Image (cartoon, helix red, strand yellow):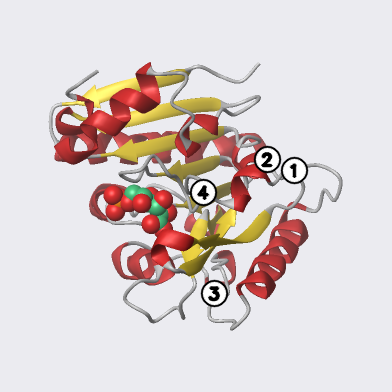
Amino acid sequence: MPSEPQVRIFASPQDLFRAAAEQFYDRGSRAISEHGRFSVALSGGSTPRGLHEEIVRNFSSRLPWDKVFFFWGDERHVPPDDPESNYRMANETLLGKLHVPADHIFRIPAEMQDAGESAAAYERTLRGFFRAPNVFPRFDFVLLGMGPDGHTASLFPGTTALDEQEHWVVANWVEKLNTFRITMTYPVLNHAACVMFLVSGVEKAQMLKEALRNPNANLPCQRVRPFEGQLLWFLDQGAGGKL
Ligand code: 6PG
């Protein structure tokens, strides 16, 4: 049975990021003690910056980073040094400040001219890491955000990637952004052990109310329901104010 969302609202963005960092740490410790490694899919956008800074500030010495493996749920179709790059943001705010071995960081090769090739290459990387060809990968922890239109990762309303049920990673044309994005698909997100949405800011409150209170809203973020995993929605008071 897909899991019910567990919604937690925190008084301030600081409290939100602190609780999210503790969740990251708890999940990491548990995964490493249970199966020797912690596989994480990071999110893009701006909200994760606060979490990254909190992990660096208060957890940098508390996890064995040689047992943590970093991936991305999605990426913009840009090179890794581009200001729009999700990899660059994570590298500047988190990975570059932790002792994570370089071969534990699996970025999406979005510098490739053909976004479809980037997606295919990344799927090969995931298949090489998870080594279970016939089953979808089971990330220990997937971090997601929610956009103002209810999108998550790069699964935008009205785009073809919403219907993908076979590929693990696809190139998704987003008409309103006039660009491709490279994104993990629902089967991958929904096979995770834990998915945590991190949402901050009053400007997200109305869409959040739709996402969590209107089952007929048919928003991309609503289709993230892990089959055998936890679904957490961590919000600050601004974002959760209309619930
Ligand atoms: C991206 C993200 C995207 C993001 C939302 C929220 O690459 O942009 O993966 O899904 O999480 O757009 O973005 P903000 O955190 O900036 O509001």
- The residues bearing labels 4 and 1 have C-alpha atoms spaced at a distance of 18 Å
| Residue 128 seen in render | yes
Q: Position of residue 97 (x, y in %)?
A: 32, 67
Q: Are marks 1 and 2 in contact (CB under 8 Å)?
A: yes
In the rendered structure, find residue 110 and report the number of the disc placed on it.
3
User: Which circle, 4 or 1, is nearer the viewer?
Assistant: 4
Of the residues under marks 3 and 1, which one precedes in the sequence?
Answer: 3
The amino acid on which the numbered mark 3 sits, given as a three-letter code, is: Ala
The residue positioned 38% from the left and 44% from the top of the image is 145
**Residue 25 falls in which quadrant of the image?**
top left
Q: Secondary structure at mark 4?
A: loop
Tell me which amino acid carries mark 1. Phe
* Mark 2 Cα-neighbour bin, 10 Å: few <14, some 14–19, many ≥20: many
- Pick whichever, 18 or 157, lies toward us: 157
Q: Earlier in the sequence, mark 1 or mark 2?
A: 1
Residue 40 image position (x, y, % from top left) = 53, 49
Q: Considering only order in the chain, which callout, 4 or 2, is on the residue closer to the N terminus? A: 4
Element under label 2?
A: helix
Earlier sequence position, callout 3 versus callout 4: 3
- Ligand 1 closer than 8 Å to label 4 CB: yes
Mark 3–mark 4 Cα distance, whole angstroms, equals 16 Å
For marks 3 and 1, give the one nearer the viewer.
Answer: 3
Q: CA distance from mark 1 to mark 2?
A: 7 Å
**Which residue is identified by label 2?**
187
- Nearest to N terminus: mark 3 or mark 2: 3
Which residue corresponds to mark 1?
136
Q: Position of residue 10 (x, y in %)?
A: 20, 27
Front residue of 138/211: it is 211
- Which residue is located at x 35 percent, y 43 percent? 149
Name of the residue lying farthest toward the right: 134
Between label 1 and label 2, give the one nearer the viewer: 2
- Mark 4 sits on what residue? 155
